[in-house]
Amino acid sequence: MTSQCDIGLIGLAVMGRNLVLNMADHGFQVAVFNRTTRKVDEFMAGDAMGKSVVGCQSPEELVQHLKRPRRVMMMVKAGEPVDRTIRQIALLLEAGDILIDGGNSYYQDTERRIKELDSRGILYLGSGISGGEEGARHGPSIMPGGSADAWPHLKPIFQEIAAKVGPNHDIPCCEWVGSGGAGHYVKMIHNGIEYGDMQLICEAYSLLKDGLGLSNARLYDIFAQWNKGELDSYLIEITRDIFSVIDPETDHALVDMILDKAGQKGTGKWTSQLALDLGVPTTLITEAVFARILSSQKEKRVRAGRILAGPHGALEKWRESVDPEQFIDAVRQALYASKICSYAQGFSQLQAASGENSWELNYGEIAMMWRGGCIIRAAFLERIKEAFDRDAGLENLLLDPYFKQAVASNQDGWRQVVATAAGLGIPTPAVSAALNYYDGYRSERLPHNLLQAQRDYFGAHTYERIDRDGSFHSDWIRLRREPQK
Ligand code: NBP
């Protein structure tokens, strides 16, 4: 049997199939296997026909087809399926061979797997991949981390198949991220930011549709316009397109036929859980996760909506006095300023995780990896790259001169939108969380002197003073007295 394939890929679902075709288009020979082997046959007889792809009926056959050191990539469902696949394939590999997990694995699982396989000399990469079906087929964003010794063996393949950005379309959206679970951590933050971006867009939609009462055709025009400016991004672009789609079954706008219950697979939740562990206020992503949870409780919301009152008559009164064009622009401002806060939070979490795990992440390179191919791709990421080029140790994106100015010049509309939404009873958890983060972060003084007093009162937790160093406790009950009238 000839051992000539450049790489083996296990898992022929939507991502695996398209990555294989992408690799084959770039001149790589790929051996493929899938647990349900019928899918190998279907793939070989379908999309892979005539391409440099070798269908295999077992892991053993796949391994036999590979050049040394063998490179095997898993594109299976995250969790137990990855461990199962590793158990099957690792037995067939030798020291120096490389195993790659391209799925959305939890970064601590990746760290465990690296250690387990290291004892057998097998190099392991945990590589986040983003871009969905289209990205996988024509150029995804790839975020590889793990055993650094494996990277030179994967770099030519990954950088070749990745999306390209830059003026000459030659900068691959794929660069080495760091050791251990760094690649999967960065992918998780990407997904968390994606949750935030999507929630912000949904809130803008709600303000324009439920607030101003705009039609889908008008929403299409607004998003088309926004996509030509600072908000230029894949998610704004697909949102624009969604407003133009008619349901062939009912002849209504398809978006209006969709039940308002959001699903999720867990990467946003992981981001929030880890933010709490690290003590980083990633509030916007967390609000986005909770907003999906609340949306999924449709039946409870329907019941509560019949019982709980909102601001009576406020919407009609507001519509009589509002200047719609001015408000549409205020929503754009709120969206952009909130988005900056969301990325500031996401990058702050990356900085904290990098410090905790000694990953030495390169934030400018991460911004460029997300610049193309992935779901959060946006012109705006170039500005983030420039910010970290200006100052690699930038404490918070909001402190960069470009972003500082961008938020300052958009804050009037942002504040107007939050106040209006509160007055109308339209929920804007992410836009409001972003503004609260911004105002909290720039507050030299917060009311937590009072909170420290409360903690010391009931729990003797002690407090620090503004006039001298040290830890203090007061006998609040003995010291308290009636206020002087
Ligand atoms: P899925 O996440 O739907 O997984 C399907 C694949 O996993 C099939 O090949 C299936 O084999 C295999 N599999 C399962 Br399920 N259980 C298995 C087990 N116990 N042992 C071995 N194989 C098993 O596929 P996907 O949507 O292509 O995603 C692949 C990975 O990439 C996931 O981690 C996903 O989170 C991530 N990802 C997906 C997207 C996206 O847009 N879909 C984007 C970015 C990242 P079978 O055919 O025999 O059932």
Image: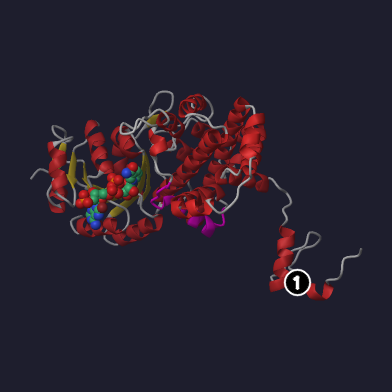
Q: Horizontal and vertical percent for residue 419?
A: 66, 41
> Residue furthest toward the bottom?
478
Q: Main secondary structure of the magenta part?
A: helix
Apparent side of residue 211 relative to residue 82 in the rendered image (left or right) = right
Q: Which residues are magenta?
A: 261-280
Quadrant where the image shows the N terminus = top left
Q: Please say if 27 is above or below 270.
A: above
Residue 173 vs residue 450, the one in the foreground: 450
Residue drawn at (19%, 37%) of the image: 29
Residue drawn at (54%, 43%) of the image: 342
Quadrant where the image shows the C terminus = bottom right
Magenta segment: does it hold 452? no
Q: Horizontal and vertical percent for residue 221?
A: 48, 24
Apparent side of residue 294 relative to residue 103 in the rendered image (left or right) = right
Apparent side of residue 44 relative to residue 166 in the rendered image (left or right) = left
> Residue furthest toward the left?
1
Q: Pointer 1: what residue? A: 473
Q: Horizontal and vertical percent for residue 454?
A: 72, 66
Magenta segment: does it hold 273? yes
Question: Does residue 103 appear in this view?
Answer: no
Q: The disc labelled 1 sits on which kind of residue?
A: His
Secondary structure, mark 1, is: loop
Residue 258 vs residue 462, the one in the foreground: 258
Residue drawn at (50%, 32%) of the image: 382
Residue 397 vs residue 135, the one in the foreground: 135
Q: Quadrant of residue 397?
A: top right
Question: Does residue 184 appear in this view?
Answer: yes
Q: Horizontal and vertical percent for residue 154?
A: 30, 42
